[in-house]
Image: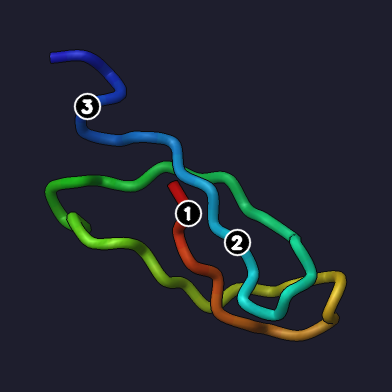
């Protein structure tokens, strides 16, 4: 099974509209839907939701 099948690289984009992104991997078996994480946005200088973009 190829490496990218189960744990693809995804980009998490800030919902604050700053354009800041995080790059991470996710497990498709555990999280088949789009990932939403609350992380720190250094441009907005606060914690906001980051949504997975494809």
Real-space Cα separation, disc 2 to disc 1, in angstroms: 7 Å
For the point 36% across and 64% down, the residue is 35
Mark 2–mark 1 CB contact (< 8 Å): yes
Please rate how many residues cluster around mark 3, counting C-alpha atoms within 10 Å: few if below 14, some from 14 to 19, many from 20. few
* Front disc: 1 or 3: 1
Which residue corresponds to the image point at 34% horizontal and 47% vertical from the top-left?
26
**Circle 1: element type:** strand
Which residue shows up at 55% across the image and 79% down it? Answer: 49
**Of the pair 31 and 51, the residue shown nearer to us:** 51
Secondary structure found at label 2: strand
Residue 25 position within the rendered picture, expressed as x and y whole percent measured from the top left: 42, 42
Q: Mark 2 points at which residue?
A: 13
Foreground mark, 2 or 3?
2
Q: Mark 1 points at which residue?
A: 53
Mark 1 or mark 3: name the one nearer the start of the chain: 3
Residue 7 in the image: above or below residue 18:
above
Residue at image mark 3:
5
Q: Earlier in the sequence, mark 2 or mark 3?
A: 3
Residue 39, image quadrant: bottom right
Label 2: how many Cα within 10 Å (few below 14, some 14–19, many 20+): many
Q: Is residue 18 above or below residue 46?
A: above
Measured in 3D between alpha carbons, the distance from the residue under mark 2 to the one under mark 3, in whole angstroms, is 22 Å
């Amino acid at each position: 099974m190829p490496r990218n099948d189960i744990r693809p690289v995804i980009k998490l984009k800030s919902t604050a509209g700053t354009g800041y992104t995080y790059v991470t991997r996710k497990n498709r078996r555990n999280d088949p839907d789009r990932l939403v994480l609350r992380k720190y946005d250094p441009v907005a200088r606060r914690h906001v939701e980051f949504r997975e973009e494809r």
